[in-house]
Amino acid sequence: MKSRNVLTLFLFISFTFLLSSCSGQMTATSWPGYSIHEDKVYLSYQTGVYAVNLSNGTLAWQYPENTDSKRNYYAPPVVTDEQLLVGDYLNTLHSLNLSNGTEKWKYETTNGRFISGVIVDQDTIVAGASDTNFYALDLTGNLRWKFETTAANWAKPASDGTTAYLPSMDNFLYAVDLKSGSQLWKTDLGGAVVGGLTMDSDFLYIGTLSNEVLSINKKDGAVAWRFSTDGAVWAIPTIKDDVLYLGDTASTVYAIDAMTGATLWRLEGIGKPIIGSAGVIDKGVIFTTEDGKLTAVDFNGQRLWEKQINGKLY
């Protein structure tokens, strides 16, 4: 039997094609993002946010009811505290009611487009924006602090409960106090970050557009190791059992020992550029490519299956 993750992925792909056909557009104006909570998948796509029933793929609600062609959504929605948080390309972070999609509150910036998803740790929301700021809000949308970098912030931040980790397109990774926003350390990564990072108890793992993956010590920001890739790394690395799985824009996928940075295996030429993160299933990992191919690879680097769809996958 296919896992729930695989079924959700195909439901997600089918629903995005349905939206495209309904709007009469062959090409999306944004790449979609989604999150799963209980019996629904919440999807941001083009000019709207949608709640879809996982059981049958029917639409539960959409926001807004009357779409605005100027307001596009790139950031995936995030569920927390009985609300759905999603930023748009028109400088606004929205909080929506989970049950019906009505707006609970919104936070507007002057020129800060929201490209990535937010994180929520305890009672603090952290969101990166294109105006060089990271914004920290409480759960009702009030500003707690903001942290300024020197370039746009497309990547998703992360937190371990006390420290927020802020990857920027200015080539730096910043560690700040989650409560106050005061800087603890910063590390020059040597390349811009557009995806985000993953972590374990001691280290952060992050890919850059300069064809590298790095392991960073959480305590002081020291670089533990660097790993060279064939192409730029857009996606957040996926970690399972102390192994990192990721793909790059050269269409090469990798399994890397998280402790040492050693190559466990690599697989070349699975399709076009890989932009999204790998998804974990029971027998291995799934990679999606820009030319619409899904490739499942087992944990030893052997191909399990491929599926071609008529569209692009980011």
Image (tube, rainbow, N blue to C red):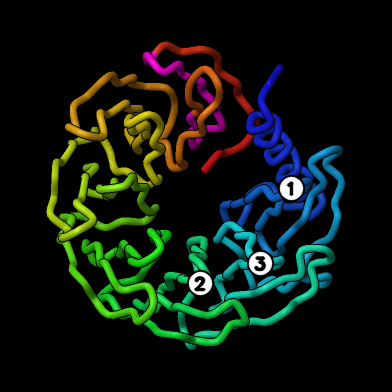
The residue under label 3 is 81
> Which image quarter: residue 239?
top left
Name the quadrant containing residue 249: top left
Classify residue 224 as left or right of residue 138.
left
- The CA span between labels 2 and 3 is 11 Å
Helix, strand or loop status at disc 2: strand
Residue 156, image x, y percentages = 42, 59
Q: Quadrant of residue 200?
A: top left
- The label on residue 38 is 1
Which stretch did the figure color magenta?
287-301
Dot 2, crowdedness within 10 Å: few (<14), some or many (≥20)? many
**Residue marked by disc 2:** 125
Amino acid residing under circle 3? Asp
Above or below: residue 85 compared with residue 205 = below
**Image x and y of residue 44, in percent:** 65, 58
Q: Mark 2 or 3 closer to N-term?
A: 3
Identified at 40% across, 63% down, the residue is 161
Q: Residue 107 got which mark?
A: none
86 in magenta: no
Element type at marker 3? loop
Residue neighbourhood size for the residue with mark 1, other residues' Cα within 10 Å, grouped as few (<14), some (14–19), many (≥20): few
Image position of 137 with respect to 311: above or below: below
Mark 1 residue type: Glu
